[in-house]
């Protein structure tokens, strides 16, 4: 179950206006568009000056700092939440009737947004239903660790969690949550991105407007805007730690197919793990990837039971759906 995403979505009325969040437009192009729009020479000069100013800002101010400047009220809110945490404010969140825990204030805010979404609540319930003693979870795109914490809470003795998350902001808050809910001996947290193969990966930090998410850029970005992170594959993760996962959760903002390609050995195993896949159909389409492709890859690996919200669904249905997102549970054997 993913935390709410705001990157790439339309701003609601009254939200902060992101500053310098687009590629600078050359002055000549700005002039042509201004003329076509019928703007006065003064207005045209003003737009050109603003374009030049934004270009200078993008080239001189590091993206992490720009991310904080893009949404001043949200940035101040995060700073306030961090100050509250440092003086001991850790409010309790009730996730289910039998599960509550103390939270960093920023994590609490994200969790409450998540718990207000029935689809995400159903997704977590389906995951919890499969948790068993001794389970091994690969939490790919762990963010603040909701699935990891659920595995520890409901899996019982011997649970092992291997969480992969590229955002240092999210990794720090994951560690805070592990301390508040722990101690846990079975959690391994990697500051890394999952990919088709191990190595490195270039990612775009979105900042506090999206709870610190890192995403794969959909367009050309300057080197200064991108952050290089370690890349690991599902197969390399299993080999590194000498484990075979029973559960794999994947939430990677449109990078699903590449992550699945990196798990051919683990996922092709006859006792392949249950896969909890957050399929970002809209982002996949924007990247030119058919939304059904990740499920077709899973079919190639021997998965035959696909469910969304507890109901059977086929790769063809997912590919034809206009929904921006699908939360899929994939298993080797049908539960019907």
Image (tube, rainbow, N blue to C red):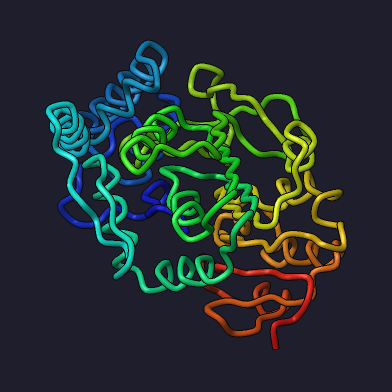
Instruction: Compare residues 191 and 293 and report the one nearer the observer.
Output: 191
Where's residue 102, x and y in %? 25, 47
In the rendered view, tell whether residue 291 sits above or below residue 49. Answer: below
Picture residue at 59% right of the left edge, 63% below the top: 132
Along the viewing direction, whichever of 172 and 14 lies nearer the viewer: 172
Q: Determine if residue 276 is in view.
A: yes
Specify whether 95 is left or right of 230. left
Q: Nearer the viewer, residue 138 or 196?
A: 138
- Residue 10 placement, left or right of 80: right
User: Which quadrant of the rendered structure holds the C terminus?
Assistant: bottom right
Looking at the image, the residue that sits furthest to the front is 157
Rendered image quadrant of residue 205: top left
Regarding residue 17, the answer to whether it shows in the image is no
Residue nearest the viewer, comparing 264 with 318 = 264
Judged left or right of residue 321, residue 273 is right
How many discs appear? 0
Residue 18 sits above or below residue 134 on the image:
above
- Residue 194 at x, y = what percent? 65, 39
Which residue extends farthest top? 60
Q: Residue at x 15, y 28 (%)?
A: 83
Locate residue 86: give its quadrant: top left
Percent x, y of residue 203: 56, 31
Across and down, in percent, residue 8 comes to 42, 49
State which quadrant residue 4 falls in: bottom left
Q: Measuring 59% from the left and 84% from the top, which residue is drawn there?
A: 311
Residue found at x 55% / y 74%: 322
């Amino acid at each position: 179950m993913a935390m709410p995403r705001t990157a790439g979505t339309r701003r609601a009325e009254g939200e902060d206006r992101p500053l310098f969040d687009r590629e600078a437009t050359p002055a000549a192009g700005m002039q042509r568009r201004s003329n076509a729009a019928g703007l006065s020479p003064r207005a045209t000069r003003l737009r050109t000056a603003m374009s030049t100013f934004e270009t200078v800002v993008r080239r001189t101010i590091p993206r992490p700092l720009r991310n904080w400047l893009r949404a001043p009220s949200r940035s101040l809110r995060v700073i306030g939440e961090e100050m509250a945490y440092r003086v001991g404010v850790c409010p309790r969140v009730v996730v289910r009737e039998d599960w509550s825990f103390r939270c960093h204030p920023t994590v609490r805010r994200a969790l409450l947004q998540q718990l207000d979404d029935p689809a995400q609540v159903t997704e977590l319930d389906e995951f919890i239903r499969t948790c068993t003693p001794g389970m091994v979870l690969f939490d790919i795109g762990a963010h603040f660790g909701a699935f990891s914490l659920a595995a520890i809470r409901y899996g019982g003795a011997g649970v092992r969690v291997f969480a992969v998350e590229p955002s240092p902001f999210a990794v720090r808050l994951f560690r805070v949550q592990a301390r508040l809910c722990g101690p846990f001996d079975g959690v391994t947290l990697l500051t890394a991105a999952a990919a088709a193969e191990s190595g490195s990966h270039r990612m775009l930090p979105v900042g506090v407007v999206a709870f610190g998410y890192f995403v794969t850029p959909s367009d050309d970005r300057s080197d200064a805007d991108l952050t290089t992170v370690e890349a690991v594959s599902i197969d390399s993760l299993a080999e590194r730690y000498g484990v075979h996962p029973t559960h794999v959760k994947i939430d990677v903002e449109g990078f699903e197919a590449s992550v699945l390609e990196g798990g051919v050995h683990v996922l092709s195993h006859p006792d392949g793990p249950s896969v909890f896949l957050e399929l970002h159909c809209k982002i996949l389409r924007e990247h030119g990837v058919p939304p059904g492709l990740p499920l077709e890859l899973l079919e190639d690996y021997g998965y035959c039971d696909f469910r969304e919200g507890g109901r059977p669904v086929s790769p063809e249905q997912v590919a034809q759906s206009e929904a921006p997102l699908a939360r899929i549970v994939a298993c080797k054997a049908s539960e019907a």
